[in-house]
Image (cartoon, rainbow, N blue to C red):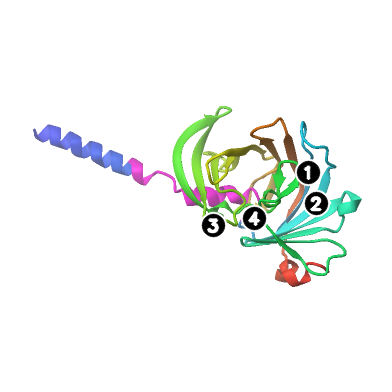
Amino acid sequence: MKNALSLITGLLLLAGSAQAADPDAAEILQSSDRSRGGGIPGIRWTVRIVPSQGGDSEPERLLTLKANATASLAETREPVRFKGSKLLQIDRNMWMSRPGLKKPIPISPRQKLSGQAAQGDIASTNYAVDYQGKLLREEEVNGEPTYVLELTAINKFCTYDRITYWVSKQRLVGVKADFFSLSGKLLKSATFEYGNQITHEKKTFPFVSKMTIKDALTPAETTLVYSDVQVTELARAEFDVNRLGN
């Protein structure tokens, strides 16, 4: 009987230790956000949006972005007819401005920008702030072990109501995502590549180089290509909504 009790006690202790070692969803998200621009005090990069294949014919867009830990600002450089248009996101609020407008216009991060890319897709990613994360399971994606997280939007201002997010266990970067509506309908899916690198606080880590977004119901596909990534100091005034039209 003593041996049996000792065995049971040992198994319970081992189970407790394994449970204590389980990763925290919030920590996984904070690490993965960093490789998509979230939580960095100052960073700038360029993104080219290649329009939908198999969808509506749209021109490519080239934007420059800058972001700090709580805000991001995108400015369109190409095509010419959109040049100078700006998109500012502060926390969960977003505004748009373009040449000729007297005041910036509040918009939703869910509004379409180009192809399958929503306005919120091009901003820096702060899933750790905008979503409640839950670790569902672990599985492999293209042979790579990943954490599978369920993300539930904290409020209606988030770009998506719910996300299933696959994060590499070793690299702690998001490699795949499924985006859902409030009713649970799959809207689109995305995959991510990390060919860029940045250095922050004397540590070098991967930064997103490509996001490929596929519509759930049509063959439409949109690619976001990221380049010229730089960690840099940015003045708070650069994210002032009152200066957005300047």
Q: Are marks 2 and 1 in contact (CB under 8 Å)?
A: yes
Task: Give the labeled residue for mark 1.
Answer: 49
Q: Is 244 positioned to the left or the right of 183 in the image?
A: right
Earlier along the polypeptide chain: callout 1 or callout 3?
1
**Amino acid type shown at disc 2:** Leu
Task: Give the labeled residue for mark 4.
Answer: 200
Q: Secondary structure at mark 2?
A: strand
Q: Secondary structure at mark 1?
A: strand
Q: Who's the residue at 51% across and 49% down the image?
A: 152
Spatial CA distance of label 3 from label 4 is 30 Å
Earlier along the polypeptide chain: callout 4 or callout 2?
2
Magenta stretch secondary structure, dominant: helix
Spatial CA distance of label 3 from label 2 is 28 Å
**Amino acid type shown at disc 3:** Asn
Spatial CA distance of label 4 from label 1 is 26 Å
Residue 227: percent from the left, percent from the top? 77, 46
Spatial CA distance of label 1 from label 3 is 27 Å
Q: Quadrant of residue 230?
A: bottom right
Earlier along the polypeptide chain: callout 4 or callout 1?
1
